[in-house]
Image (cartoon, coloured by chain):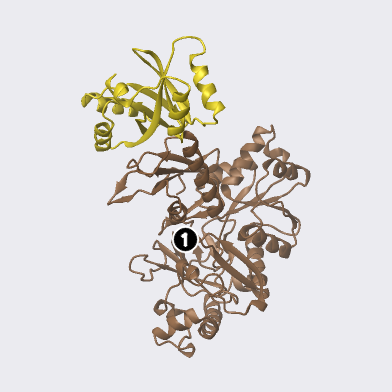
């Protein structure tokens, strides 16, 4: 089933005409409504009328996450506050979160792309969908929610966590679809077995999994534990949230909804656009978003694109699973974590040094984060109580900053390996690619 | 009466304590008193040596994180109630103790006492005729 055949299986020339038209309008909007873009475009001597085709994208400036931080909280918005009907936020590179706003039409568009995504996974009004993504500032829960309502499925907004209740509702409500992070799906599968249940006791047929990287081994594991077909959904809050791209039943990459989001692949070092098939950093331009349109936003996700028509009949460009990041962002339990956020926390604590190391692992399919922090060589107390307090204080401050509980281990000064004078910040033991 | 104790922060890692004692041994430094406070992830080794500043330099050179802490050393009569009488004096005077540990010396048992107010510890113990060790004495042991 295809939700919107007119777009998803469009003739590519027709699609491009639509993109060009929307793109030219978008440039006009950001030029007149967002001072940040007006300045950037003016510097290049570009005026709205000059831009007529998405082929001109390569000559236009990029937007990076730091631009969003510099314009925190609403500086990137292209509409007055009266037109904003929703705000979401995700982690920024330092203390400040990345804020995204939505107009009424933006929410309508978001529901549309999620409805297309769910339809790709075979979800229809005959299904009950258990949404086990977190509801709140995170885009996962509410994003899936409105798309599922648009499809007409029965929505079970259980939100994240509370595994026992998840299992109970899977049995009692007979949910046929579940949406959550892939690692949580694996955890649910294992918990099912621990409760003495099998996939025969539940009715799941499809899983909508995203918000963190996962491997094909994990896909097979989750599919066999829960007895469903696992689908990969891609999105990031800056662009819209989940529903930027989605895998169909043929699972040969994720279809990007190009009538709203124009993808490019660039070389992260030279910033040159790379041809289809080559691996590089994924960049998006949002051509229809009203509240916070972004021009050439660098996602930092590394992947490649293909434009061949899919066996499902869709003509949309497909992206591979992400192969990694071109920056140091980690995704832990679905939460974006930048090492610089941890540095910002430690900076405020005199008894801890700024030398730290993150050890990320996956135990029982749940991510664990351990932060080794060197104590300050001069200022440490020789009382266990004081050191334990320091450890707990770091843990507390990290939890407030990241929304994630980490195990804190205090270590001796000069024990974290340095390379070129800088500490080696991250050891990721998870095998995700 | 104030004695300089060395404190070394050690990760719980095989061989780390061995390295510490080897560094002292190679530099011919004798430990008079010694104790370890440990948690799941790290420990603090506390000890007294005759020339604290020399030991601090040696250990810093070897890359150990070392601090000095003021402590008081009480000589405890080797008989029932010996320690009790001293602690009763401290609690009667509301002097808080952070930690203590005992060590053997020629005079019998001795106890290292760490308090945030070492001067007060000395004052009240001496006022009650309890015997304290001088820095010069303990360093000579």
Colour of chain A in the image: brown
The percent coordinates of residue A254 (x first, y second) are 53, 60
Position of the N terminus of chain A by quadrant: bottom right
The percent coordinates of residue A189 (x first, y second) are 63, 40
Query: Along the horizontal axis of the image, is A104 left or right of B141?
Result: right
Say which element carries label 1. Answer: loop
**Would you call the spot at circle 1 few (<14 residues within 10 Å), some (14-19), or many (20 or more)?**
many
- Can you name the residue that lies furthest to the bottom here? A49
The percent coordinates of residue A31 (x first, y second) are 50, 84
Query: Along the horizontal axis of the image, is A322 left or right of A81?
Result: left
Pick the residue in front: A152 or A416.
A416
Residue highlighted by disc 1: A93
Residue at position x 39%, y 63% in the image? A278
Q: Is residue A388 above or below residue A432?
A: above
Q: Is residue B120 above or below residue A48?
A: above
Colour of chain B in the image: yellow
Q: Is residue A24 above or below residue A294?
A: below
Quadrant hosting residue B22: top left
């Amino acid at each position: 089933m295809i939700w919107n055949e007119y777009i998803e299986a469009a003739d590519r020339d027709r699609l491009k005409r639509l993109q060009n038209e929307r793109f030219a309008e978008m440039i006009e909007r950001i030029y007149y409504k967002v001072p940040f873009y007006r300045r950037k475009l003016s510097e290049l001597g570009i005026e709205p009328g000059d831009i007529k085709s998405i082929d001109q994208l390569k000559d236009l400036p990029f937007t990076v996450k730091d631009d969003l931080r510099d314009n925190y909280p609403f500086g990137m918005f292209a509409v007055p506050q009266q037109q904003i009907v929703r705000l979401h936020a995700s982690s920024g590179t330092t203390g400040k979160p990345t804020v995204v706003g939505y107009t009424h039409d933006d929410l309508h568009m978001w529901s549309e792309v999620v409805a297309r995504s769910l339809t790709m996974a075979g979800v229809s009004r005959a299904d009950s969908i258990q949404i086990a993504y977190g509801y709140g500032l995170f885009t996962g829960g509410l994003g899936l929610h409105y798309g599922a309502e648009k499809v007409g499925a029965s929505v079970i907004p259980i939100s994240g966590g509370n595994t026992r209740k998840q299992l109970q509702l899977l049995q009692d409500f007979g949910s046929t679809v579940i949406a959550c992070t892939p690692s949580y799906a694996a955890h649910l599968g294992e918990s099912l077995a621990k409760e003495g249940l099998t996939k025969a006791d539940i009715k799941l047929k499809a899983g909508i999994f995203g918000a963190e990287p996962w491997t094909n081994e994990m896909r097979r594991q989750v599919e066999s534990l829960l007895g469903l077909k696992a689908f990969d959904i891609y999105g990031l809050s800056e662009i819209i949230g989940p529903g930027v791209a989605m895998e169909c039943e043929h699972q040969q990459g994720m279809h990007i909804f190009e009538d709203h989001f124009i993808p490019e692949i660039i070389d992260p070092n030279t910033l040159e656009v790379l041809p289809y098939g080559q691996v590089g950093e994924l960049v998006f331009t949002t051509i229809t978003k009203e509240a916070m349109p972004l021009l050439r936003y660098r996602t930092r996700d590394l992947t490649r694109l293909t434009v061949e028509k899919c066996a499902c009949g869709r003509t949309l460009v497909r992206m591979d699973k992400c192969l990694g990041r071109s920056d140091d962002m980690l995704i832990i339990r679905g939460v974006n974590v930048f090492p610089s956020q941890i540095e910002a926390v430690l900076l405020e604590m005199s008894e801890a040094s700024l030398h730290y190391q993150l050890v990320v692992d996956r135990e029982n399919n749940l991510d664990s984060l351990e932060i080794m922090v060197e104590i300050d060589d001069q200022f440490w107390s020789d009382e266990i109580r004081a050191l334990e307090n320091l450890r707990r204080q770091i843990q507390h401050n990290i939890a407030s900053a990241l929304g994630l509980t980490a195990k804190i281990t205090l270590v001796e000064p000069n024990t974290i390996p340095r390379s070129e004078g800088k500490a080696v910040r991250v050891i990721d033991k998870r095998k995700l690619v | 009466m104030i004695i300089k104790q060395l404190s070394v922060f050690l990760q719980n890692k095989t061989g780390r304590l061995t390295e510490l004692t080897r560094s002292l041994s190679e530099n011919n430094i004798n430990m008079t008193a010694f104790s370890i406070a440990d948690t799941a992830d790290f420990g603090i080794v506390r000890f007294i040596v005759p020339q604290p500043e020399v030991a601090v330099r040696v250990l810093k050179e070897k890359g150990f994180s070392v601090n000095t802490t003021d402590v008081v050393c009480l000589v405890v009569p080797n008989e029932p109630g010996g320690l009790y009488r001293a602690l009763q004096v401290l609690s009667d005077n509301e002097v808080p103790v952070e930690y203590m540990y005992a060590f053997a010396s020629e005079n019998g048992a001795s106890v290292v006492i760490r308090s945030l107010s070492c001067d007060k510890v000395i004052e009240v113990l001496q006022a009650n005729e309890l015997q304290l060790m001088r820095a010069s004495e303990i360093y000579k042991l």
